[in-house]
Image: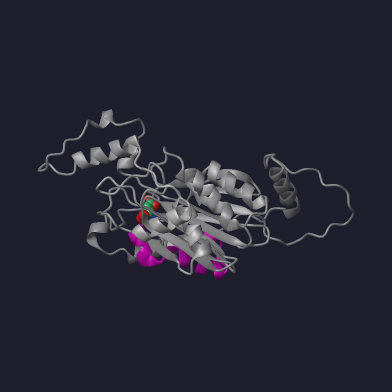
Amino acid sequence: MMHNQEPDRREFLSAASALAAGASLAGPEPRPNRGPEILIRRPHPAVVASHNAFPHCTEAAMKAILAGKPVVDAVVEGVTLVENDPEDHSVGLGGIPNEEGVVELDASVMDGASGLSGAVASIRNIKNPASVALRVLRYTDHCLLVGEGALRFAKAHGFKEEELLTDDAREIWLYWKGNLSSSDKWFAKDLDQLPAGAKKWLTTTGTVNCCGVDRNGQLAGTTTTSGLAFKIPGRVGDSPIVGAGLYVDNDAGAAGSTGRGEANIISCGSLIVVEAMRRGAHPTDACKEAAERIVRLTKAKHLLDARGRPTFNVNFYAVDKQGRTGGFAIKRKDTYAVFDEKGNRQVPLDSVFAD
Ligand code: ASP
């Protein structure tokens, strides 16, 4: 597969400093005449993320990287905006709850520079699990805290407990609950009585993944989610599982994922992406390899449609040490978010199956 040529780094570095100074990446500044220049072959900063990270999460992450913050802090700063957004029902405040109407969140962070990871799973009442995961990485000798223990740890670090089920998310859950069975006593409202935009969340879930690299080639990533809608309480998806919903290796690249977590856990998707980048694959080709692996590994009848294709989707996103970005999905033409030397933008996501 052919991919774009590397951009002129001198041009990017001047544009990147313009952004750091508050300007946009619309175009390069004129270069002062300083005689023959040495072209420094450094990676350029880049951020890659799931579609719901566009534009604010990717912008915040890039700004933080350009301001010199550690990449792991930068990506967590970015996804915090999405976690705090009650309109995004895939994560944090306003996340779609489990089958009992309780919001349970999963998140992980991985830092290439230190080679450490941190994660929380099935945490309740804390709207920023990615920040808690970062505390696990920095202030414990562990990789993953779950449930009650994760909540206690978060509270010890000053995170405030709050109700994460918003009125809109509650309406969506009640609609699902009321249609679950004709032999219970729950009735649902009519579909057209649901809040505007609520309908899509009955069939779509989601997650925010954001990975980045700075100009020194330091890589990091984070994935945060409310998981599959109406899941069984205690269910943990791929997002807090290192190697599945997120993987970072400072020598190769960073990758993350959204979509059906169970399939991604079974295939170790993000690890597959990073290992392909280590062999020199472009991030898009690396993501394609992981998506194809899930297709190959999906054999159970209840997960296959009449054409023998997976009934679900998984998307991968990746950035390598040189700052090249890419993404690939199993199905469904979608977009992902990229902020690099060309600016903050949405990019079409290719897929294994076109229809
Ligand atoms: N990957 C998430 C999970 O399985 C859900 C999603 O991204 O839609 O928990």
Coloring applied to the structure:
one colour
| Numbered range of the magenta stretch | 261-285
Occupied quadrant, residue 294: bottom left
Magenta span: chief secondary structure: helix
Horizontally, residue 98 falls left or right of residue 280, namely left
Q: Residue at x 53, y 63 (%)?
A: 138
- Percent position (x, y) of residue 70? 62, 57
Magenta stretch contains residue 131: no
Image vertical order of residue 115 relative to residue 155, above or below: below
Q: Quadrant of the N terminus?
A: bottom right
Occupied quadrant, residue 323: bottom right
User: Between residues 233 and 15, which one lies in front from this camera angle?
Assistant: 233
- Percent position (x, y) of residue 259? 38, 53
Q: Residue furthest top?
A: 193
- Percent position (x, y) of residue 161? 40, 47
Horizontally, residue 219 falls left or right of residue 24, namely left
Horizontally, residue 232 falls left or right of residue 238, namely left
Image vertical order of residue 24 relative to residue 132, above or below: above
Image vertical order of residue 77 relative to residue 244, above or below: above
Residue 351: tell me if it is visible.
Answer: no
User: Between residues 304 and 220, which one lies in front from this camera angle?
Assistant: 220
Counting the numbered discs, the total is 0
User: Between residues 66 and 303, which one lies in front from this camera angle?
Assistant: 66
Q: Residue furthest left?
A: 183
Q: Residue furthest right?
A: 35
Magenta stretch contains residue 272: yes
- Percent position (x, y) of residue 141? 48, 69
Q: Residue at x 58, y 52 (%)?
A: 74
Q: Residue at x 85, y 47 (%)?
A: 32
Residue 225: tell me if it is visible.
Answer: yes
User: Between residues 269 and 193, which one lies in front from this camera angle?
Assistant: 193
